């Protein structure tokens, strides 16, 4: 298996915590190490050490699920949270961002169009490669 198909270490450990919590709710106790071993086998590895070695020492992605973010979408300021994040081609990340308040994406006095959630692909600096007609990135995230 290659790193491009695996979640990052933080996501795998979170998965193990959720597995433990779910089993505990059903009356089955499971240690954290046993949960990590179970997650490892689900990903096709012999044990957690083997899976951890396959992950390497790469740092976790800058943008992560649940992270609070702020910035501009189509020139409009926003605050929100990352609902989903996954690796994209070229070291970019595909994000789903849910806005705290809907963002009006139309620059017209005649009508409005509000977005509550968007999908975008950003680089490590939090900028999309996609640009508006005046050359501005669709999304610009502020530094974390």
Image (cartoon, rainbow, N blue to C red):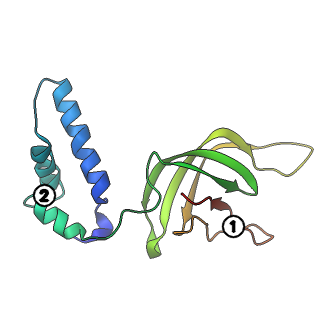
Q: Residue furthest right?
A: 109
Q: Residue at x 18, y 36 (%)?
A: 20
| Disc on the earlier residue, 1 or 2 | 2
Residue sitting at x 10%, y 36%: 30
**Position of residue 100 measured from the top left corner of the image (x, y, whole percent):** 62, 38
Residue at mark 2: 48
Q: Position of residue 42 (x, y in %)?
A: 16, 52
The single residue placed furthest to the front in the displayed view is 144
- Count all numbered tags in the image, as a single digit: 2
Residue 137, which numbered label? 1
Placement of the N terminus among the 4 image quadrants: bottom left
* Residue 32 as seen in the image, left or right of residue 90: left
Taking the view exactly as shown, the residue that stands out farthest to the bottom is 90
Q: Residue at x 72, y 44 (%)?
A: 103
Label 1: which secondary element? loop
Position of residue 40 relative to residue 58, above or below, is: above
Q: Residue at x 35, y 67 (%)?
A: 59
Label 2 secondary element: helix
> Does residue 67 appear left or right of residue 112 in this picture?
left
**In the drawing, does residue 94 fall left or right of residue 41?**
right
Which dot marks residue 8?
A: none
* Residue 115, horizontal then vertical, whole percent: 68, 44
């Amino acid at each position: 298996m290659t790193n491009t198909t695996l979640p990052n270490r933080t996501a795998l450990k979170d998965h193990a915590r959720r597995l433990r919590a779910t089993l505990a709710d059903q009356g089955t106790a499971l240690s954290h190490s046993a949960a990590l071993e179970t997650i490892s086998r689900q990903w096709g590895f012999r044990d957690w050490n083997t899976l951890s070695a396959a992950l390497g020492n790469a740092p976790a992605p800058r943008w992560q699920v649940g992270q609070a973010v702020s910035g501009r979408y189509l020139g409009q300021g926003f605050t929100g949270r990352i609902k989903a994040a996954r690796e994209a081609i070229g070291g970019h990340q595909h994000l789903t961002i849910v806005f705290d308040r809907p963002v009006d994406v139309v620059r017209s006095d005649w009508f409005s169009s509000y977005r509550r959630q968007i999908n975008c692909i950003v680089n490590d600096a939090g900028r999309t490669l996609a640009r508006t007609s005046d050359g501005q990135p669709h999304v610009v995230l502020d530094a974390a």
